[in-house]
Image: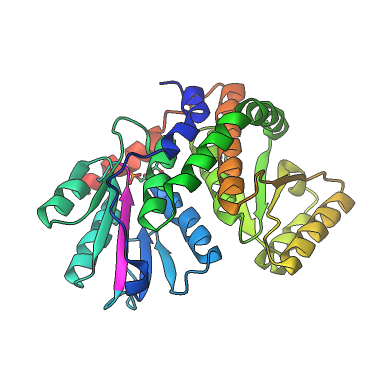
Amino acid sequence: MKAEKLVEGFWQQLLPEGGIPRIPLSELKGLVLCGMGGSGIVGSVARTLLLKRGYEKPVVTVKDYDLPPFVKDGYGVVCVSYSGNTEETLHNFRQALERGLPVWCVTSGGKLEKLAREHGLPVALVPKGLQPRFAFGYMFSRLLLMLGFTEKELKDGAEFLRAEQDGLKKLALNLAERLYGFVPALYATPLTAPAAHRWKAQLNENAKTPSHDAVLPELHHNELMGWSNFLLRDKFVYLLFKDPEDHERNLLRAELTEELLKELGHNPVVLEGKGETLLKRTLWLINLGDWVSVLLAGLYGYDPLSIPLIKQVKERLEHA
Ligand code: PA5
């Protein structure tokens, strides 16, 4: 299926059928969400939503081989890998078993499904045959249900996005034209950081565009000094993501960021998700970024579905 069709139909992925295993969050000491790339971002977005909702235990994302040493007795581990064959995530899975921790998996199959079945562990399956990043909605909706979000919340989100498609595509075309020829600098608040990071990855993979993200308030302590470089700062288009539920000081910092960039002659694109809940606003921003990335790929003449370098690295590692 063409990338544009997949982006347009993103909302449909948010409507999983039943039978999704639930994670007993209140019984855990903490939760670890493992996954890389297009699967890893699923955990990052879910973590922000879960904590904003008031979950009182530590929730960490792991995008590396080793689980942190504190992840032991009482922690639960979720392994998300679309292919089920990602070596870092498989290593996390094995380590979690070695430490005697409960594990849940979200995958379309591969070694992860096989291992999970062998150990009698719960698996939420997603449809096969897609590129991982174009299956975000499938993995995300299943993970949210595992974490106690409701089918109604997901259905509302899906209906909302469905109705937004024309507007999103129009806005995305405008943004893609603005980004053409520049390196996107994606500045986010803590609540919008996962969506901005998804933009970064989609611009990298789909539009074959280097891009960079940084998060407030930290970016006020380093990133902004880079703007002094008159030779380099004009190579970027600046985008500023924020959410009405962010800490008021971060919202003030977002305004200040905009002001400072304007004083340097830049006109940052300010992006706030649409919708009355953080879930909807995050989905809206993600869907917008997906649109931008495939339309920008079109402007550059790239195939959004082709990722030869990622494949090459995986192959070389397999034989190393
Ligand atoms: O978008 C991609 O294809 C990658 O970022 C993959 O998601 C990443 O390499 C991990 O693979 P998987 O999602 O199959 O675990």
- Choose between 126 and 80: the one closer to the eye: 126
- Choose between 282 and 156: the one closer to the eye: 156
* Image quadrant in which you'd find residue 255: bottom right
Percent position of residue 274, x then y: 67, 43
Horizontal side of 83 relative to 174 (left or right) equals: left
Quarter of the displayed picture in which ligand 1 can be seen:
top left
Horizontal side of 226 relative to 99 (left or right) equals: right
* Total numbered circles: 0
* Image quadrant in which you'd find residue 38: top left
Q: Residue at x 44, y 73 (%)?
A: 58
- Choose between 142 and 153: the one closer to the eye: 153
The magenta-colored residue range is 75-82
Residue that extends furthest to the front in the rendered view of this protein: 152
Report the magenta stretch's main SS. Answer: strand
Q: Does residue 211 show up?
A: no
Percent position of residue 98, x then y: 17, 69
Q: Residue at x 63, y 27 (%)?
A: 169
Q: Residue at x 73, y 32 (%)?
A: 178
Percent position of residue 63, x then y: 39, 58
Q: Residue at x 72, y 65 (%)?
A: 250
Horizontal side of 265 relative to 170 (left or right) equals: right
Residue that extends furthest to the left in the rendered view of this protein: 118
User: Is residue 77 highlighted in magenta?
Assistant: yes
